[in-house]
Structures are given as structure tokens and as C-alpha cells.
Image (spheres, grey):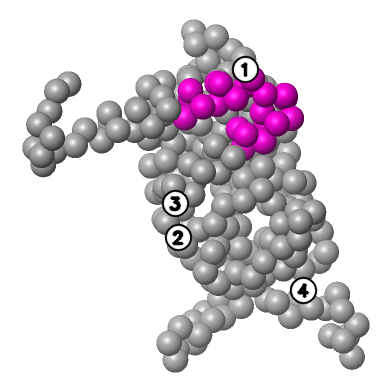
Amino acid sequence: MARLPDSGKIDLADVFRRVQQEMFAHLDVSGLFEHPSSSGAATEQQWLDLFQRYLPRRYRVAPAFVIDSAGRRSRQIDLAVFDNLYSPLLFPHSAGLHIPAESVYAVFEIKPAFSRSVILDAHRKASSVRALLRTSVPVISGSTLRSAIPPRPILAGILATRALWSPRFFESRLRASLAAIDYSLDLGCCLAHGSFECSGRKLHLSHPSESLIFFVLRLLERLRSMGTAPAADLMRYGRALQSFKR
């Protein structure tokens, strides 16, 4: 629809649709010309770039392992959303970023397409994070001692370009796949077919042309409702050292 360049109005839905089309084109071309392994890396980078573009600076996103003070480690997470202001990166090593469980807000699996097996694997990866121990200690804000923040449930989801199911059966196959894991994935974005949000056992599904804006807005709202990540009890992590045992 034609509009005056300085009309003072903007069609937000149209802007997001164009961003979605651009991202879909980039992901589609990567899959055509690149080796599967490099195509997968390119796909992950596209999603990382998207998150970095839309999330507030209080959050950081990266592929990572999640660890706890008991020495347990999650499976490798394609995209973790974690605290960027207060939480330390305990092991920022080239072999893989290791972040404390207390700092994690959300974890996402990135795949070329939705399928039942992919959704099951995303559930298993999320479970490996959710099972970790999370501590919380009081913090000082200004000159006031604030009570420890109770850890909130970690969000989990899946991101993909398309689905292995036909558009006609997308909703029914998605619903059946999520029901099989008791709706443990909170959010998902399939650019070509639609995004979803689970509220308990209730499934909200977007129109295919609004996949991206639906997912981004739902994610931002869920993150806002989580508040601030708890402050980790770093002394608990330190107990792995002989010096802390004296």
C-alpha cells in the first residue's frame, strides 16, 4: 500500500512481514548452496542475529553449555538467553561457553524443520537444563539488602525455517507432538508455517505470515514477566576448589 514518506504512520505488521520474508530468504539460500554442517552454522547465526537485534541489552544470547554448582552440565544448547548484567561467565572458553544455571532465562533448539523427533530432542535438551541446581542469594541494591530472588521456570523452545508436515496438517501434527511431551516447550517459531506458544496445555498458534512478530512479541512478554535472574551463590561453585574446603 502506497504511503507518504513523512506521513507520521508506520505499518508495523508490514515491517515484520518484510523482516520475516528477508530472514526466510537468507535461510532458504543457505540450505541450497552450503554443506549441511556449514548450513546449520549459518542457520544458527541467523537466529542469533535476530535475537540480538530484538532483545534488550540486559539479555545476552549464545550457544552454550549450562552448568550448576554441583558440577553437572547440560547438553549443548543451540541458543541460550541469559543475564548480561550481573551473572559471570565462569568458563568463556573456545571449546564452548559455560554459563551458570542461575543466569539462564530461556533455551532454544535450532533445526531446519519441525518434526516429532526434533520436538522430542528439544524437550530432552531443555530437560537437561531444567534439571540443574539453581541457587539464589540476597543482593544489595543501593544500600539496601534485597531478599534472594526465587528462580523462575526456564523457558524452552524450538526454531526452524519450515516443517516436515504439510501446511494442511501442521496444526494437528504440532499439537500431537507437543502433547507427547506434555507441552513442555513454551515457544516455537516455524517461519513458513506459524509460531506457537503453550500456556499450560493450551496452544496458541499464529498465522503463517505473522510467524516472526508473534514469536518475538510473545518471547519479550514472557521474558518481561520473569523479572531479573537470581544472583548465584558463587561460594557454592567455589566448593569444588581445595582452597574453599579448608
Callout 3, which amino acid? Leu
Amino acid type of disc 4?
Tyr
Dot in front, 4 or 2: 2
Q: Are marks 2 and 1 in contact (CB under 8 Å)?
A: no
State the residue at coordinates (83%, 64%).
71
224 in magenta: no
Q: Does the magenta stretch include residue 41?
A: yes
Question: Between 58 and 139, which is closer to the camera in this rendering?
Answer: 58
- Residue that label 1 marks: 32
At which x and y percent is residue 128?
74, 48
Q: Is residue 26 left or right of residue 128?
A: left
Residue underneath mark 3: 55
Estimate the x, y position of residue 7 in percent, counting from the top left.
8, 37
Kind of residue sitting beneath label 1: Leu
CA distance for labels 4 and 1: 45 Å
Task: Read off the residue under disc 2.
Answer: 57
Residue highlighted by disc 4: 237
Is residue 103 in sight in this rendering? yes
